[in-house]
Amino acid sequence: MPLLAFDGECLLCHSFIRVLLRLDRKEIFQLTSIDSDYFKERIKKQPVDVTIDSVILFSDTSVYYESTAIIETLRQLPFIGRLAPLGYLIPKGIRDKLYRLIAKHRKKRHYLSFVHWFL
């Protein structure tokens, strides 16, 4: 079962998680905050680069960060999962640069309305 670790203090992350919970009808994902004890125990078993300011997706065999974590998360959902791989058409450097730009401002309230408008 994939584990998605996110910033528990991030308003944008909370909005994304709420949408994910609505779409994840088969309960594919486990969710945890990066600040949680569960996450701290998990990274002892499967080390990750915690210096990256990113959502982290743990699959059975891989760990994904930044834009790739978002695409891989969306790939596992009904309907949108068929469209998500189109994200790979954008070069990783550009995707991750955009991800970092959004992440830099993710705790600001105005991103909440953006997410609700978009999704």
Image (cartoon, rainbow, N blue to C red):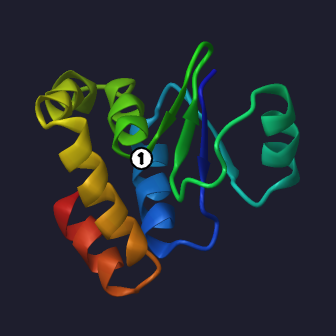
Q: How many marks?
A: 1
* Residue 15 on image: x %, y %: 43, 64
Question: Label 1 is placed on what type of residue?
Answer: Glu
Q: Label 1's element?
A: helix
| Side of 109 where 46 appears, left or right | right
Rendered view: 16 above or below 38? below
* Residue 116 on image: x %, y %: 27, 68
Q: Residue furthest bottom?
A: 109
Residue found 11% across the figure and 29% down from its top: 89
Say which of 12 and 26 sits in front. Answer: 12
| Side of 42 where 10 appears, left or right | left
Residue found 16% across the figure and 36% down from its top: 91
* Residue 50 on image: x %, y %: 66, 50
Say which of 99 and 11 sits in front. Answer: 99
Say which of 100 and 56 sits in front. Answer: 100
Say which of 42 and 93 sits in front. Answer: 93
Residue found 31% across the figure and 25% down from its top: 78
Rendered view: 44 above or below 38? above
Residue 51: which quarter of the image? Answer: bottom right
Report which residue position mark 1 lands on.
66
Q: Quadrant of the C terminus?
A: bottom left
Residue 103: which quarter of the image? Answer: bottom left
| Side of 9 where 110 appears, left or right | left
Q: Within 10 angstroms of label 1, few (less than 14), some, or many (20 or more) residues?
A: many
Q: Quadrant of the N terminus?
A: top right
| Side of 78 where 31 appears, left or right | right
Rendered view: 74 above or below 100? above
* Residue 11 on image: x %, y %: 48, 74
